[in-house]
Amino acid sequence: MKIRRAVPEDAASIARVHVDSWRTTYKGIVSEDYLNKLSYRKRQEMWEGAIPKGHVFVAESPDGRVVGFASGGKERTGKFPLYDGEMYALYILEDYQGSGTGKKLVYQLAGDLKKAGLHAMLTLVVENNRARYFYEALGGEKIGSDEVEIGRNSMVELSYGWKDLQRIL
């Protein structure tokens, strides 16, 4: 699996992974109506704006297909003063989950955030999303929780943090 920095031409592929991953990961957690309304076009437009700002990485299969991505940057909420960085997104197509791709993407992102002068990182994950166990296995500690609404469904969103990016690397 090749991990590399995303380029603007990856926006459509990242959008596909983003939408398809949501539809498999959140099936039974978020309403089917909400998942069906996710738009490749809207996600592509979002990623076209985000990629040039940096800290976006893709995982390519041996045949050159984008099968996962991670993005991050400065922590956005201000609720966690000990955590200056944030992993905004980590999504991998279902067929590639459990292959080590997620770890490689997290390591690449953490290294890039460290090079950018950030020292700690957090990420947010819906409590019913099994990815929370992946973050725990990577040494993430539960540092908070919040009530959120996604598609008219109320749920708990957990915050996991790593106090030192070096420990992830």
Image (cartoon, grey):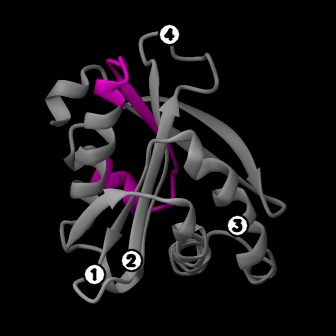
Q: Is residue 12 depicted above or below 137 in this figure?
A: below
**Residue at x-position 25% and y-position 27%:** 165
The question of residue 127 being in magenta is answered with yes
Residue 67, disc: 2
Which residue position holds label 3? 43
Confirm or deny contact between disc 4 and disc 1 (CB under 8 A). Answer: no
- Please give the label number shown on residue 37: none
Residue drawn at x 40%, y 69% as measured from the top left = 68
Residue 116 lies left or right of residue 88; in this view the side is left
Question: Residue 15: in sight, yes or no?
Answer: yes
Q: Are marks 4 and 2 in contact (CB under 8 Å)?
A: no
Q: Which mark is residue 81?
A: 4
Rendered view: 34 above or below 4: below
Query: Residue 117 appears at what percent x and percent y?
Result: 35, 17
| Disc 2 from disc 3: Cα separation | 16 Å
Are discs 2 and 3 less than 8 Å apart at CB? no
Residue type for callout 3: Arg
Residue wearing tag 1: 61
Question: Which amino acid does the dot numbered 2 rest on?
Answer: Val
The C terminus: image quadrant: top left
Q: Nearer the viewer, residue 43 or 159?
A: 43
Q: CA distance from mark 1 to mark 3?
A: 21 Å
- Tell me residue 47's x, y (percent): 64, 58
Residue at position x 81%, y 79% in the image? 37
> Which stretch appears magenta?
113-135
Q: Is the C-beta separation of discs 4 and 3 under 8 Å? A: no
